[in-house]
Amino acid sequence: MGIVSLITGRPGSSGFGSASTAEQVTDGIDATNLTAVITGGASGIGLETARVLALRKAHVIIAARNMAAANEAKQLILKEDDTARVDTLKLDLSSIASIKDFAQNFIALNLPLNILINNAGIMFCPYQISEDGIEMQFATNHIGHFLLTNLLLDTMNRTAKETGIEGRIVNLSSIAHQYTYKGGIRFQKINDRAGYSDKKAYGQSKLANILHANELSRRFQEEGVNITANSVHPGLIMTNLFKHSAVVMSICLFSYIFICAGFLKFFSFFLWKNVPQGAATTCYVALHPNLKGVTGKYFLDCNEMPPSALARDETLAKKLWDFSNKMINSASKTSA
């Protein structure tokens, strides 16, 4: 897809583009036999993703930290369609204990799991450490989803084997993955306040989302597992992610235009999406039959696009996998 497609919304090879909505890209798809977990499904593009998957008859589990908001989201979906299958479970991705509790509670429901959408995230946060001693954006955006995915993999794999239906994991990343620290991930300084940049820390976590999906994909293919893993950039949408800075639009624009995105991508930032458009790529990758067997890819505006060189680095992906496991094990021992 070229710059003209980004600006005009002209469809790419998939038949969809930046102007496509989540309902449009899933039109005619019957998801009756599918169960999906969506993190951060109580608001923004997560809620729209939950709504559209429920509209297509999937059984949707909204995983959210704010249960009042999650239950309100459920009622909004049921108001539109009283036959929708929607449940809510508490999940705080910045807390290893909460993630383990969520996984136990979900598994106790004895439900299948076909789709895992790692949607939730925080953005441009002031320096903060999680309860487990991990820098907050890395903890929430990457480590939380890394652990959650690992804890649910047995259920996903069993579902795929028993039903013959391909499982799908979708990680929400961002074009911001191009704007990160030197070398991509600050492995030796992940929690250091010195040198901390809220923008680069966010970019680091979004790079980690792609590397995570790619390493999952490699392992699935190596093991012959019937699950795919892909990552997506939803586009620029004004949601609650922007709550940490009143001037974040300007920062985002100028930082990404001139530092990471390149001058030619300048014009694409004028195409701010609405929420239905922002959820389109997630829903497309999660449900569309054309993506059966497609794995380890990065999608922008419902079309496959190459991510940064760092995001394609297999050695970096393996290193991040091992590093993430060590962080979780260390944090778990400390809290025990």
Image: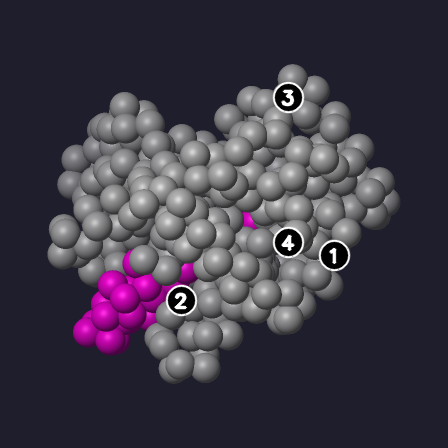
Q: For the magenta stretch, what is the residue range?
A: 152-175
Give the label on residue 289, or none: 2
Q: Nearer the viewer, mark 2 or mark 4?
A: 4
Q: How far apart are marks 1 and 4 (CA)?
A: 9 Å
The mark nearer the N terminus, 1 or 3, is 1
Q: Helix, strand, or loop for circle 2?
A: helix
Q: Name the residue under label 4.
A: 187
Asked if one can make out residue 280 in the rendered structure from this viewpoint, the answer is no
Q: How far apart are marks 3 and 4 (CA)?
A: 27 Å
Q: Which amino acid does label 4 sit on?
A: Phe
Q: In which quarter of the image is residue 31?
A: bottom left
Residue 61 in percent (x, y) is at: 26, 45
Q: Distance between the residues labelled 1 and 3?
A: 26 Å
Residue 53 in percent (x, y) is at: 32, 48
Q: Which of marks 1 and 2 is in front?
A: 1
Above-or-below relation of 198 to 101: above
Q: How far apart are marks 2 and 4 (CA)?
A: 38 Å
Q: How far apart are marks 3 and 2 (CA)?
A: 39 Å
Dot 2: few (<14), some (14–19), or many (≥20) neighbours within 10 Å? few
Q: Name the residue under label 1.
A: 183
Q: How many marks?
A: 4
Q: Which residue is drawn at 48% across and 35% down?
A: 130
Q: Distance between the residues labelled 1 and 2?
A: 36 Å
Please say if the residues under marks 3 and 4 sit with CB atoms less than 8 Å apart: no
Q: Helix, strand, or loop for circle 3?
A: loop
Q: Mark 3 points at which residue?
A: 245
The mark nearer the N terminus, 3 or 2, is 3
Q: Quadrant of the C terminus?
A: top left
